[in-house]
Amino acid sequence: MQRLPKMMTKIGGPVCDVFINHRGIDTKRNVAGLLYDNLTRIGVRAFLDSMNMKPGDRLFQHIDRGILGCKVGVAVFSPRYCDSYFCLHELALLMESNKRVVPIFYDVKPSQLTVKDNGTCPPADLQRFAFALEDAKNTVGLTFNSLNGDWSELLRNASEAVIMNLLEVKEERKYAKKQR
């Protein structure tokens, strides 16, 4: 993975515990929105663009700050996920900053996710996105089929995965402090 630019590591402090990366058109009104509601209800500070941003916010600055300040990322992969530059940028930043990422494969199989070159994206970004996507596809995640899946089970499993990862990050940080 490539290293983060120095200025990126200086963008603000903790914004959230969990950053929810998703393709809004596919998942904002179902899995991403429901997961956000469930996590915030149990006291986890979650970042979902439609809930944490207001008119006038600088898009990349606000989102990048949320990613760099989070402890865990949730990547909700969906059929049109890879069509979005923003989704892939967020995923790349999560992976490059070595965040723990919980993948949710919503109505899509990992093998169906590929970075497409539509001619508008610089080659360096395409490479970043492809590396990040492969890394995420090789991370244990949750799968869900919206036609016959159990929504309450998905939300329970996703919330539990987030909480377990948050606890592990907390323990790792505590251990790292003791080592200093």
Image: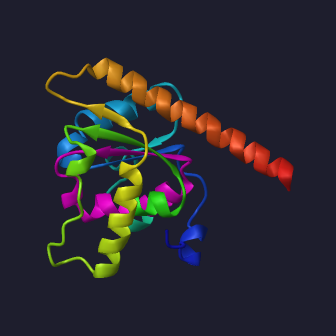
Q: Is residue 146 positioned above or below 127 on the image?
A: above
Q: Position of residue 79 (x, y in %)?
A: 17, 47
Q: Is residue 99 positioned above or below 163 on the image?
A: below
Closer-to-camera residue (7/50): 7
Q: Quadrant of residue 140?
A: top left
Q: Residue at x 22, y 60 (%)?
A: 84
Q: Is residue 158 positioned above or below 86 on the image?
A: above
Q: Position of residue 68 (x, y in %)?
A: 53, 59
Q: Residue at x 39, y 38 (%)?
A: 141
Q: Quadrant of the C terminus?
A: bottom right
Count every numbered label the image shows and give the total: 0
Q: Give the extent of the magenta segment.
A: 62-90
Residue 56 seen: no
Q: Quadrant of residue 149?
A: top left
Closer-to-camera residue (70/108): 108
Which color scheme did the rendering employ for the protein? rainbow
Is residue 120 a member of the stretch shown in magenta? Answer: no
Residue 17 seen: yes
Q: Quadrant of residue 159?
A: top left
Closer-to-camera residue (90/62): 90
Q: Residue at x 58, y 38 (%)?
A: 166
Decide if residue 87 is on the left or right side of residue 170: left
Decide if residue 178 is on the left or right side of residue 157: right
Q: Residue at x 14, y 73 (%)?
A: 118
Decide if residue 165 is on the left or right side of residue 153: right
Q: Position of residue 130 (x, y in %)?
A: 32, 65
Q: Position of residue 95 (x, y in %)?
A: 47, 58
Is residue 76 a member of the stretch shown in magenta? Answer: yes
